[in-house]
Image (cartoon, coloured by chain):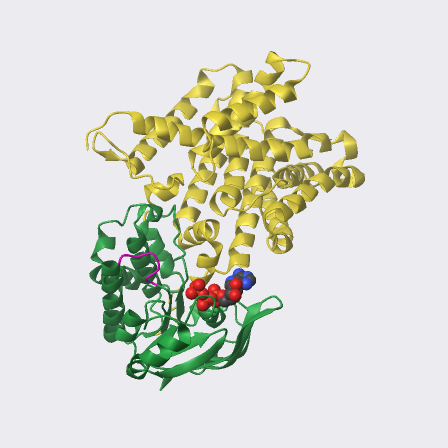
Amino acid sequence: MSALIVENLVAGYGDARVLHGVDLNVGQGEICAILGPNGAGKTTLLRALSGMVKARGTVRLGGTSLAGRSPDAVARLGVAHVPEGRGTFMPLTVEENLRLGAFVRRGKKDVDADLARIHTYFPVLKTRLKQAAGSLSGGEQQMLAIGRALMSRPRVLLLDEPSLGLAPLVTRELFRIVQAVNEEERTTVVVVEQNAHLALGIAQQAHVLETGRIVLSGTAAQIRADEQVAQSYLGYRV
Amino acid sequence: MTGRADANPATRDAAPATAAAATGEAGATSVRLFGWDAARWRWVAAAALLAAALYAPFQLIPFHVFQLTMVLVYAVALLGLNLLVGHAGQISLGHGAFFAVGAYAAAILMERWDTPYPLTLPIAAAVAFVLGLVLGVPAMRLRGLYLALVTLAIAIFLVPLLKRFEEVTGGSMGLTLAKPAPPAWSGLAEDQWIYFLVLAVAVAAFLLAGSLLRSRVGRALHAVRDNEIAAEVMGVRLSFYKTLAFAWSAMFAGAAGCVYTWVIGFVSPDSFTVNLSITLLAGLVVGGLGTMAGPVLGALFVMFVPGISQEINDAAPGVIFGLLIIAVMYVAPTGLAGLAGRLIRKIPRKE
Ligand SMILES: Nc1ncnc2c1ncn2[C@@H]1O[C@H](COP(=O)(O)OP(=O)(O)OP(=O)(O)O)[C@@H](O)[C@H]1O
Ligand SMILES: [Mg+2]
């Protein structure tokens, strides 16, 4: 069963077209990695999925069409987007950030229970609850961003370069947690990553995006095996 | 398990607002003095302030009681402006207009329909709220300088409008009204009675604003202020919450305008020029954006500093007033409330 179906997605900024017809089919509970060089349109793809940039084409979440909906409406339908740069509410506390993640949900008991659940994934956040989120380290802020996204109990989690600016050790830990979340909650994940090695390590399927088109698709294993091709094609190491 | 909002929309999340949010200061860890945290101290300070406020009118001469009453009036107006500017991160250069609408609503109700004064408060607040909603829908689509300009325009067209509809508003002459009379059982003088009325309104307004800000909606406003894009992907409908903030802040300004009419017993267009709007915004920024103390400190500034400026230099009070604003912002860039917070943190303390 597909959680997310994207067909012929075209998007851009003003007159500048960035995506030229992207197709994706992500199964329920799958992790899908989007790889590609800088400026390929990876961020734009996630933005188009969550309604942050205008797009044409088909985007279906389960049976519901997301096309043309505003970001808040898409969020209410169960898509949680962890944007590039994390989107931390700096002056607010860690707890307030987390609770904002559950903004689309009602029921204090459930939210409190989820807060506890997030703490088991990210124990470091628990010790920082009353601290201003802006005072967290980069890695902690990334954990907060993911934890906050999980607070909405998303059906699909969109992660934009979670490794950006983080130490390799922290990045590995982060990917381990994403994998754990995916396994335990059956949350579908679309992850954009420069660190192809790590992303392919947790993903089932992968796509290579270049100048707004998917130029290579397959299972994570296939893409990994295609290292030679990818290396020469993309000019960077997979 | 879906991401949709589940049932029970009535359950408002009442988690206690935490120190950093309440003071709006990034990176501030909570202050502990003698084992009490910042939230506890805030309540103590509020209680002490209230006790002083209850005691003051029996110790002061009527003119000073009147001045203190006006401080409370401005505090309510600034409280409203703070919801919009300090908490939702939007600007308004025209909030004097909503103050005027509240003042005129009260005056017209009392003058034309003999409405008893207590009734004018909810009506004036409601009128200002609805007007805030109507003007907020288009205005809140704009940002930054565009929003500033449009709100300024609201303040600018108000005065000629009030003069134009002379039959209702009394034109340039304005309307003169009887002030609320103290009931015999109270044993209070008129100025004291009015003072206590306004104090009650101010306390109610602060409690209401406080509970609004601690609710889920308050969190949404802070999210919009701190990161619009992230707020939107969290499911916060920007236009809805901005407009709501605008309407609320108009409502508080309208309530303040209404009690202003009770206090002064006279309204005229020239009391509500653009100057009032600018002074309110300046007062709020000087007092401290996004804090609970900010509107009170700002109200003191709005009330007393123009008078002090006049004393220093009778010829050009505006110059002194402007210089004082610059001076305060230089010493305390986050406003007087921020300065007070910094001073408190300087006090040595046990951990
Ligand atoms: N807000 C914007 N306005 C206009 N053009 C933009 C905007 N954001 C991105 N672009 C352009 O769209 C193209 C794709 O950008 P995008 O951010 O999607 O790339 P990316 O694959 O995420 O790159 P990176 O790996 O560097 O994050 C780039 O040419 C970029 O200049
Ligand atoms: Mg990107």
Q: How many marks can you see? A: 0
> Left or right: where does residue B123 sit relative to residue B24?
right
Determine the image quadrant of residue A202.
bottom left
Read off the magenta span. A162-167
Q: Is A221 covered by the magenta stretch?
A: no
Q: Can residue B177 be seen at all in this image of the molecule?
A: no
In the rendered image, which quarter contains the N terminus of chain B? bottom left
Q: Where is residue B326 in the image (x, y as percent from the top left)?
A: 55, 26
Q: Which residue is drawn at 53% across and 47% down?
A: B248
Q: Can residue B245 be seen at all in this image of the molecule?
A: yes
Q: Looking at the image, is A110 positioned above or below residue B44?
A: below
Asked whether B88 or A168 is in front, the reply is A168
**Which chain, by letter, is green?**
A
State whether the magenta stretch is mostly helix, strand or loop.
Answer: loop
Determine the image quadrant of residue A82.
bottom left
Asked whether A33 or B83 is in front, the reply is A33
> Left or right: where does residue B19 sit relative to residue B83?
left
**Which chain, by letter, is yellow?**
B
Q: Looking at the image, is A133 positioned above or below residue A187?
A: above
Q: Residue at x 44, y 75 (%)?
A: A209
Q: Where is residue B54 in the image (x, y as percent from the top left)?
A: 42, 25
Asked whether A226 or B234 is in front, the reply is A226
> Left or right: where does residue A213 sit relative to residue B149?
left
Q: In the orientation shown, which residue stands out farthest toward the front?
A: A232
Determine the image quadrant of residue A36.
bottom left
Q: Position of residue B260 (x, y in %)?
A: 60, 32
Q: Residue at x 66, y 13 (%)?
A: B314
